[in-house]
Image (spheres, rainbow, N blue to C red):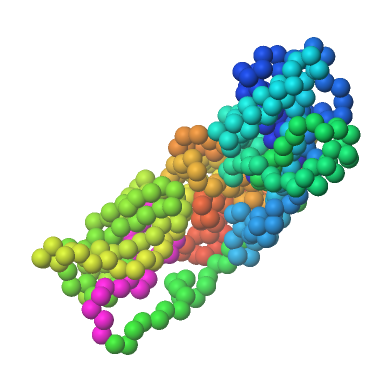
Amino acid sequence: MSDPRSVAAATEGLRAVLQDAVSRAVPGAVVTVGAPHEAAVEGAAAELNVFLYRTTVDGAWRNSDPVGARPGETRCPPLPLVLHYLLICRAPADAGATVPQLLLGQAMSALHDRPVLSPDVLREAAGFSDLYRQQEPVRITPAALSTEAMARLWTALHIGDRLAVAYEARVVLIDSAVPGRAPLPVLRRGERDRGPEVTASTAVTWPALHSVSPPVAAPGTELELVCRGLDAATVSVSLTHAVLGGPVVLPARVISAGTVRAVLGEDHGAGRWSVVVSLQAADGSRRTTGTRWVDVAPRITGRLPLTATRDSGGAVDLAVECTPRVHPGQRVELLVGELPVPAEPFTEPTGRLRFRVARGVPGRYAVRLRVDGVDSPLVDARTEQFEADTAVVIT
């Protein structure tokens, strides 16, 4: 996501790409972003004007669920903007009649070869905005305008019949300023936190994985998997993560006719992992069960409660140590009470994260670290009571 300055950042990024291109075609040519009816830059051999003449809202993104929201949580979705530009070519009368055409050809070729505003371009051209951190790329594509629509633009913008072409930049996601709410979790949801299970009443020879417990585990935890059809020479458990990859193969022990146990590694990454049980027969054939899920929970390892002091603007900076380490590409948030706070960007696997609460209110809050939708434990598993020191104190 990005801030409201991302509209100007997208324009600056587009200007930087085009300036590099037209300078090679017409030495001394400049790219401007002002009003198209204004006079050309004094002394410029030629000018390419990038004019933002219209903005629209992307319908697909507007109807999508807010990124990172879970059932029971409320978040305001981002504002998804599509920016419509007009590239207008002009040159002094003594420069030659084909100079605007040289500008147009070079500009269209540059946008054909570089249809995405890369983070490096946006960071260098528009460092005042965090648009370069947006995960969804900003794509530049030609926009087909009819002759009638182009004539109306010429008239409305008072540019005569200058050579022009239309493009659109999609999509710029502007974060909502309304904070979301992430209510505290339910302590218990049925026996051993299991939902309803359905099993076949007829004999089925293909192996099946019915359940994995505990459904939320810490690294180093022993998993118990209830299966059917474990008649095999070798049994193993494989886990796969959408960001961290895999499969990670865990040695398994068959405890009984329908139970398998396997231990998570101490450095097993946090997040949601898919689980399958693989069976290899004596003849070398292999069968695999269907997929179940296990959530590997992060844990805050630093001293709690955290004590933080607001700065002159009311903001609070928090440093949180955790295990296991989180990796680039994982979505990391700190839930301070009911307020989700995204982690500051990081480029390498790390066990130390930084968070900035824009408007911290003095008080004591329960904190949870959320990695890819999985929260750090907030209650003692034995007593099912909230841990007293799992908190942040803002003064």
Q: Look at 69% across and 40% down and name the residue there.
A: 167
Front position in the image: 338 or 301: 338
Q: Residue visible at 32% across and 87% down?
A: 201
Quarter-of-image position of residue 124: top right
> Where, quadrant-wise, is the N terminus in this rendering?
top right
Residue 150 placed where, x, y %? 79, 42
Q: Quadrant of the C terminus?
A: top right
Left or right: where 67 falls relative to 199: right
Q: Quadrant of residue 15?
A: top right
In terms of depth relative to the viewer, which is nearer, 265 or 83?
83
Tell me which residue sits at (58%, 47%) in the image.
333
Q: Is residue 341 above or below residue 116?
A: below
Magenta span includes 130: no
Residue 305 appears in view: no
- The magenta span reads 203-224
Furthest residue in direction front, as rendered: 97
Measuring from the top left, give residue 315's x and y in whole percent. Answer: 73, 38
Image point (48%, 49%), residue name: 299
Give how far across and how far down residue 112 sits, in percent.
58, 35
Give yes or no for residue 209 being in the magenta stretch. yes
The residue most toward the bottom is 201
Query: Could you tell me residue 318's position as x and y percent?
Result: 62, 38
Say whether residue 131 is left or right of residue 268.
right
Q: How many numbered marks have been drawn onto this rendered protein structure?
A: 0
Above or below, 194 against 117 in this view is below
Say whether residue 112 is visible: yes
Which residue of the protein is positioned furthest toward the left in this rendering? 283
Q: Is residue 363 found left or right of 138 in the rendered image?
A: right
Question: Quick one: 64 or 165, which is closer to the camera?
Answer: 165
